[in-house]
Amino acid sequence: DTSPSEAANLNTSNSIGVSALCAICGDRATGKHYGASSCDGCKGFFRRSVRKNHMYSCRFNRQCVVDKDKRNQCRYCRLKKCFRAGMKKE
């Protein structure tokens, strides 16, 4: 059996169903933004990208790693991952 505190550690979602980790880069999520659990960095990136209708391009093969350390290296792949995580413009 697990103690209540151990059981709480196994559950990565808080009481309102928001994952503790950003669905895009894996950093600590600050809440559900635009439909996906995300950190403030990815929230702001998505907001700016959508508002300004940015058209990014990938310099590699559109399979770049998007994590906390490399999330700023390829905007195309980061935005693609935002949409795949369920982020929506409204």
Image (tube, helix red, strand yellow):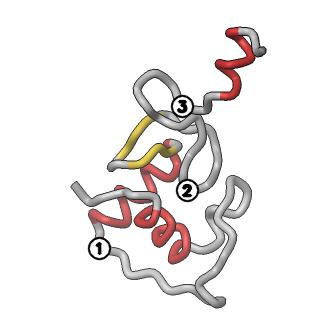
Callout 1 touching callout 3 (CB < 8 Å): no
Q: What amino acid type is highlighted by mark number 1?
A: Asn
Q: Estimate the x, y position of residue 61 in percent, counting from the top left.
A: 64, 90
Residue 2 in the figure: left or right of residue 48: right
The residue tagged 1 is: 53
- Helix, strand or loop status at disc 1: loop
Q: Which of marks 3 and 1 precedes in the sequence?
A: 3
Towards the viewer: 74 or 89: 89
Q: What amino acid type is highlighted by mark number 3?
A: Ser
The local crowd at label 2, few if under 14, some if 14 to 19, many if 20 or more residues have their Cα within 10 Å, is many
- Quarter holding residue 6: top right
The residue tagged 3 is: 13
Q: What amino acid type is highlighted by mark number 2?
A: Ile
Image depth: mark 3 or mark 2 in front: 3
Q: Estimate the x, y position of residue 27 in percent, counting from the top left.
A: 64, 44
Name of the residue lying farthest toward the front: 1
Q: Note whether 4 is above or below 56 in the view shown.
A: above
Which residue is pictured at 45% across the width and 66% down the height?
84
Image quarter hosting the N terminus: top right
Q: Estimate the x, y position of residue 53 in percent, counting from the top left.
A: 29, 73
Which residue is pictured at 31% across the width and 65% down the height?
50
Which residue is pictured at 30% across the width and 58% down the height?
88
Q: Which of marks 2 and 3 precedes in the sequence?
A: 3
- Quarter holding residue 12: top right
Image quarter hosting the C terminus: bottom left
Residue 66 in the figure: left or right of residue 80: right
Towards the viewer: 17 or 64: 17
The residue tagged 2 is: 24
Inter-mark Cα distance, 3 to 2: 16 Å
The local crowd at label 3, few if under 14, some if 14 to 19, many if 20 or more residues have their Cα within 10 Å, is some
Q: Which of marks 1 and 2 precedes in the sequence?
A: 2
